Image (tube, rainbow, N blue to C red):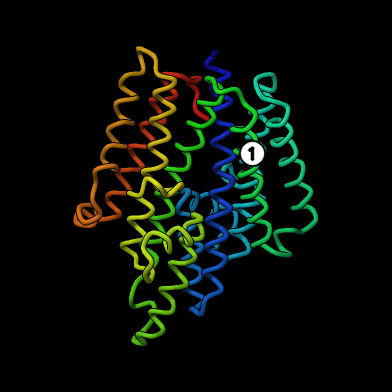
Amino acid sequence: MLSRTADHLFWMSRYTERAENTARLLDVNYQTSLLPQSEAKALVGWQGLIGISELLPAYTEKYGAVSARDVMDFMVKDEANPSSIVSCLSAARENARAVRGTLTTEVWETQNQTWLEVRRNLKAGALERDPGQFFEWVKYRSHLSRGVTVGTMLMDEALYFMRLGTFLERADNTARLMDVKFHGVHSDFYGTDENTKEEYDFYHWSAILRCVSGFENYRKVYRDIIKPERVAELMILRRDMPRSLHASLNEVVHNLELLATDNAGDTLRRAGKLCAELRFGQLDEILATGLHAFLTQFLDRVNDLGSHISRDFLVPSPQ
């Protein structure tokens, strides 16, 4: 396969997954902002959301002070923001259009229809009318795209590059979500009322689990009250949790093995080593060294892995 074709397929899937993850982040922040809390603490949550994508300088330059409405506009509708939902869906559609002949009709029509509908929905005020419903729609279109891809594409290199992009992006976004949200909960937030603290804990961690479609999975695995350390274990080490770091890296390695060439051995080794550390790692070891330090290092290694994949398989110029 031509590297340019592989590049378009890889980034089409990354941008679709990024749009979904942005919707998930916005949705969980919107839900947690409705909990009883001071206005200052609510704004800290919105500021942290921009920090996940390292977009605070760009936001501040355009909007100034942080506010919920401006953050949602910036992360959903702002076409000048390359990580906004509308920008990601536009980029996914353009990458799909560039390799229209490689895709099945169903995959192309799903991408194209998503782009047409998101513009129509935003123009009709869907975000302002019901943010939660709009974010659910974005997630649904991403689910539809993945399902149509797996259900109609030939199981060859084109599919492997698409899956590779999806799961590399998912690993990156899950780590960013955890890094910000786990540091957004502090005991001094709740005051001295222990009952209030426990109640907020439940709703906060429930919202985070729902952000990664993990609430029911948590109940099934642990059958206990929601505890931060178990949320961390579910989202980092559980191979059977679809959006965990382990599950995502496992898929990355699997698809790299299917694509591996003689000159890509170092890339596969890096991916395999990172996946093995998640497979055999223990939460106590991670917490002992610090969750923030672990996630920061993980993000650096995922970005490095993405660079090696681009070098070995894709067009050199980054997107």
SS type, badge 1: helix
Name the residue located 50 percent from the left edge and 68 percent from the top edge.
Answer: 43
Q: Is residue 193 in view? A: yes
Q: In the rendered view, would you say 125 is above or below 301?
A: below
Residue occupying the point 32% across, 19% down: 265
Q: Residue at x 44, y 54 (%)?
A: 177
Image position of 227 (left or right of 91): left
Q: Which residue is mark 1?
A: 145
Q: Amino acid at mark 1?
A: Ser
Which image quarter is the N terminus in?
top right
Front-most of 75 and 185?
185
Against 184, residue 74 (above or below) is above
Taking the image as drawn, is residue 79 in sight?
Answer: no
Image label count: 1
Q: Name the residue at the bottom extreme.
A: 193
Residue 106 x/y as whole percent: 71, 31
x and y, in percent, of residue 159 in the image:
55, 26
Picture quadrant of residue 63: bottom right
Vertical side of 85 occupied by 205: above or below: below
Rendering coords of residue 117 (x, y %):
76, 45
| Residue 16 occupies quadrant | top right
Residue count near mark 1 (Cα–Cα under 10 Å), binned few <14, some 14–19, many ≥20: many
- For the point 57% across and 38% down, the residue is 15
**Image location (x, y in percent) of residue 99:** 65, 21
> Does 271 sit left or right of 44 as displayed?
left
